[in-house]
Amino acid sequence: MSRASRASTKDKAAAQAVVGPAIVLVRPQLGENIGFAARAMANFGLADLRLVAPRDGWPNEKATAAAAGAYATVDSATLYETTELALAKTNYVIATTARPRDMVKPVMTPESAAAELLSRQKQGQTCAILFGPERSGLDNDDIGLVDALVTAPVNPAFASLSLPQTVLLIAYEWQKQAGPGGLGRATRFDGPAREGTPLPNTRPAEREEMFGLFEHLEAELDAHGFLRPAEKRPTMVRNIRNMFHRMQLTEQDVRTWRGIVSSLTGGKRRNP
């Protein structure tokens, strides 16, 4: 895809990106992984991609292809010869690592790291996250440049994450802290999704409505001899009511259930 045809996509992605920490890839080996990392950044609202001495040079067409639409992030990536130069204008830096280091540095989870980064950003600090080469990760000289380490709670028997996986994990935790709070893709009809059960055109049932359903149902069950023997009736009624309480019925659900009971007991008969 030409740069001209990518312009609208680039502008759109840039408009949706938020100010956040720089993603610094130190000596990345594969152009594809740079592109996948850029895509993960765009997914979660990050735009500042910095590359330190990529093995196959820059720009890289394989990175552009792998970005799959995150062209703004790829096209605006900045190139540095050393890690020190990439971090020169930053105030606070964390490094990702899967193994303990013989250095006295704070160690955080991705969630804690995202919270710390957001807090420092609100104070006006410029922050960065350092990611190492695919094969070996960051060396101790690079680790020596940072303020803290971030390690994910992975399976100890298989703890190695790929470069794009690690970027996506950190970017996801950043978006959780800094994002607008919606889930998925917002639409002009529904807006962003929210955690929980949506209740369009209805509401949770009130207890008065639930009690009316219980009286209706139990009267019909009595009339048809279901709630027998008499000594077991109180327990059976409680069990039936508890089933409905676990359903967390809406007002519409209650009306539907009352219609079902009426239909089954001959309240409204219709020809087939």
Image: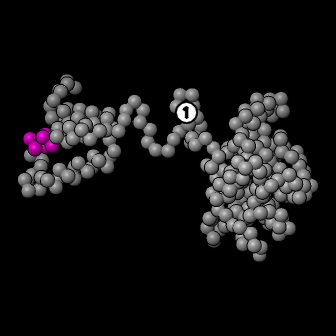
The mark total stands at 1
Q: Is residue 55 visible?
A: no
Residue type at mark 1: give it.
Answer: Gly
Question: In the displayed image of the protein, which residue is found farthest to the front?
Answer: 123
Q: Is residue 241 left or right of residue 100?
A: left
Locate the N terminus by quadrant.
top right
Disc 1 crowd rating (10 Å Cα; few below 14, some 14-19, many 20+) is few
Percent of width and height locating residue 40: 70, 47
Q: Which residues are magenta?
A: 218-223
Q: Residue at x 61, y 41 (%)?
A: 180
Q: Residue at x 70, y 62 (%)?
A: 150
Percent of width and height locating residue 173: 64, 52
Question: In the displayed image of the protein, which residue is found farthest to the bottom?
Answer: 102
The residue where tag 1 is placed is 191
- The secondary structure that most of the magenta stretch takes on is helix
Q: Is residue 145 left or right of residue 118?
A: right
Question: In the displayed image of the protein, which residue is found farthest to the left?
Answer: 230
- Residue in front for this viewpoint, 56 or 52: 52
Position above or below: 114 against 152: above
Q: Residue at x 77, y 51 (%)?
A: 125
Position above or below: 85 against 65: below
